[in-house]
Amino acid sequence: MNILNTILLAGFALNLQTGFGFSNETITPAASRTTEYFSLLKDKRIALVGNQTSKIGNVHLLDTLLKSGIKIKKIFCPEHGFRGDNGAGEKIKTTVDEITGIKIISLYGKHFKPRPSDLSDVDIVLFDIQDVGVRFYTYLSTLNYVMEACAENGKKLIVLDRPNPNGFYIAGPVLDLKFKSFVGLHPVPIVYGMTIGEYALMINGEHWLKNGVVCDLKVIPCINYTHKLKYILPDRPSPNLPDMQSVHLYPSLALFEGTCINVGRGTAFPFKVFGHPKLENAGFNYTPVKSIGNSLPLHMDTLCFGMDLRNYPLPDSDCFTLKWLIWAYQNFPDREKFFNIFFLNLSGNNELMNQIKKGFSEEDIRKSWKDEIEKFLVIRKKYLQYP
């Protein structure tokens, strides 16, 4: 293992010592509330939807379930795989868990939705994945298609809720359904301020599943969580979100994925820096290289110039900003090649790109979201489980 990969693996543990000063000890994620759902699983055939974040303390949920005699027929995993070490967009093969021998079915790529044959020998689907509260983070789409498959095949879904590390604010344009894709299926802002359990209730309640079907859904809630808290994640949710600084910068910097700008993929500090070989007037530079979760990072092995946000002081409320995107566009020497078509899916509309091209200020762009966000807040309020 090279030095960069060692740093990437160690990053989350280091960040837990240098976080917000808020203790997670008072919050109990739903997975730890075994008395609330083990009885529902007894003598049933279970499919687990999970990844490396599906834990009770330091023990994987799968191990706890098996030790308790619960029958796990198969595992479904989202983007990045069951162990969470596949990079963004990397193909994940259906395989077998080396420790338990249980079949693991990938729900990323062409097989994004469980097939009827996948669920034929299952009574209940149990979902436990740590989300980060951002519309284009694809675990939401996995949730949607699991709910849809359960509804269509008459299977019960139990969602074990987890706190949202970006759940303390709401920001960004609401998705126009003309631009729906696997990085955004529903008319919500980029940062929507809900846990994954609340979001599941909203999908059901708003009839957002295909043909308006409704899933037989039960959400097991967390204890002592509120949307005012900045929750510190105990594990990295995906390979390129190694610590809390990256988690809080992600909603803003991920929009660069729809441009020619590298966002630190292939470095020890993904989603904490950004750069491009042609931004030569910027004072910071780095070189992306192949690493864990980054088999082919943008501008690999090429010196990039840009900004270092590792020590950027994040606000206590709204962490989302367009200022770096606007700055990069205005300082890029070949603006016609700055954006790519993927930006429309990430932003969820064609307005944001045009606003930036026309030189709108961030303040004016934010004003254009106001009415749609207010409509969303009315919908959101119906499904909140936490103050």
Image (cartoon, grey):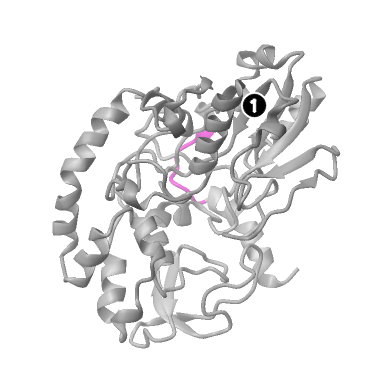
Residue appearing at x 30%, y 42% in the figure: 170
Horizontal arrangement in the rendering, residue 146 relative to residue 208 (left or right): right
Residue appearing at x 86%, y 39% in the figure: 101
Q: Is residue 180 magenta?
A: no
Q: Is residue 265 visible?
A: yes
User: Residue 339: percent from the left, percent from the top?
Assistant: 35, 72
Quick one: 289 or 95, which is closer to the camera?
95
Horizontal arrangement in the rendering, residue 270 relative to residue 58 (left or right): left
The residues colored magenta run 18-24
Amino acid at pointer 1: Val
Image height of 363 relative to 359, above or below = above
Quick one: 246 or 10, which is closer to the camera?
246
How many numbered discs sit on the rendered protein? 1
Which residue was labeled with disc 1? 125
Image height of 352 relative to 157, above or below = below
Residue appearing at x 56%, y 71% in the figure: 267
User: Residue 269: percent from the left, percent from the top?
Assistant: 52, 66
Q: Is residue 309 visible?
A: no
Determine which quarter of the picture holds residue 377: top left
Majority secondary structure of the magenta segment?
loop
Horizontal arrangement in the rendering, residue 184 relative to residue 316 (left or right): right
Determine which quarter of the picture holds residue 291: bottom right
Could you tell me which quadrant the N terminus lies in?
bottom right
User: Residue 11: percent from the left, percent from the top?
Assistant: 59, 58
**Could you tell me which secondary element the residue under label 1 belongs to?**
strand
Image height of 63 relative to 285, above or below = above
Residue appearing at x 46%, y 68% in the figure: 263
